[in-house]
Image (cartoon, rainbow, N blue to C red):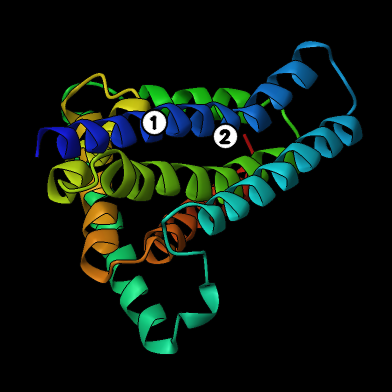
Amino acid sequence: MKKWMEKKWISNGLWLLIGTALFLATQLPMVALFYGVQYAWSDLMINALVLGMTTLLVCLLWWFMKWSPLDRLDFSQISGRDLGRNFLFFLLLLANNFVGATVLRNIGETTTANQETIQGLSSVAPQLAMGLLLVVVAPLGEEIICRAVVPRLVFKGYEKIGYLVGAAVFAYLHGPSNLGSVIIYGGMSLILTWVAYRYKRVEYSILLHLTLNSFAFLVTILLSFLPA
């Protein structure tokens, strides 16, 4: 039994190292965007750089899911019924964000620190690059790390605890700094975690995360056309 436990903890520890490396890889498109903006590259060059890094990351994540003990990514299994359920959870996410935003206003804040950073970057970065980060990189990277690698590999044998840890990691990565942001990102993380846990496939939480980010990005684009 002791040897078995030692091997199990060694395995979990190795997956923690691999998961950490995978997380760092998910930051490369963002680093590429910052690099391009810092050195005042043209929008075309920044878009090309971020698109290239995003493509490499998607291939890496796809290969990782195929190589690891996790189920390989398969979005073809998502049915029309699943899309309807996804919409209901999307409405729940919007309701959660509304509650969080209301709390923010009551404490004299207008937005979260994470959203303020995104808005600041959006003002200087090309929309295509920002769209890739928000609609592709974030949903794929964050969901695979927080809703698959952490609970099912790092915490293998203790998956229920792992899902809670993954949810906490997700919320922490979004830098909550007050009650309103805790509600927004904590509630969002719990909803996404429940979806991944309940339906045993990370594709469902990826789709839900993608839907929310796409909606937010589209609203941001539409607002940019309004007169100042």
Towards the viewer: 93 or 172: 172
Pick the residue in front: 29 or 147.
147
Residue 36 is marked as: none
Residue 101 visible? The answer is: no
- Is tag 1's residue or tag 2's residue first in the polypeptide sequence? 1
Residue at (90% x, 31% y) in the render: 45
Left or right of residue 129: residue 140: left
Q: Quadrant of the N terminus?
A: top left
> Which amino acid lies under the numbered mark 2 shown in the image of this protein?
Thr
Amino acid type shown at disc 1: Leu
> Do the residues bearing badges 1 and 2 touch, measured as CB atoms within 8 Å?
no
User: Residue drawn at (59%, 31%), measured in percent from left and top?
Assistant: 25
Q: Indicate whether 65 appears above or below 146.
A: below
Query: What is the distance, in whole Å, between disc 1 and disc 2 at their CAs?
Result: 19 Å
Q: Tell me if mark 2 has few (under 14), some (14-19) or many (20+) residues whose alpha carbon lies within 10 angstroms of its own.
A: many
Q: Position of residue 81 (x, y in %)?
A: 36, 87
Q: Is residue 96 left or right of residue 121?
A: left
Q: Quadrant of the C terminus?
A: top right
Residue at image x 28%, y 23%? 109
**Image mark for residue 14:** 1
Q: Give the residue at mark 2.
A: 26
Nearer to the camera, 32 or 162? 162
Most distant residue in the top direction:
39
Crowdedness of circle 1 by 10 Å Cα count: few (<14), some, many (20+)?
some
| Nearer-the-camera pick, 199 or 138 | 199
Position in image of residue 114 (x %, y %): 41, 26
SS of the residue under disc 2: helix
Q: Is there any visible trace of residue 161 in the rendered image? A: yes
Q: Quadrant of residue 123?
A: top right
Q: Is disc 1 placed on a helix, strand or loop?
A: helix
* Image spot of residue 31 (x, y percent): 66, 22
Q: Position of residue 154 (x, y in %)?
A: 30, 38
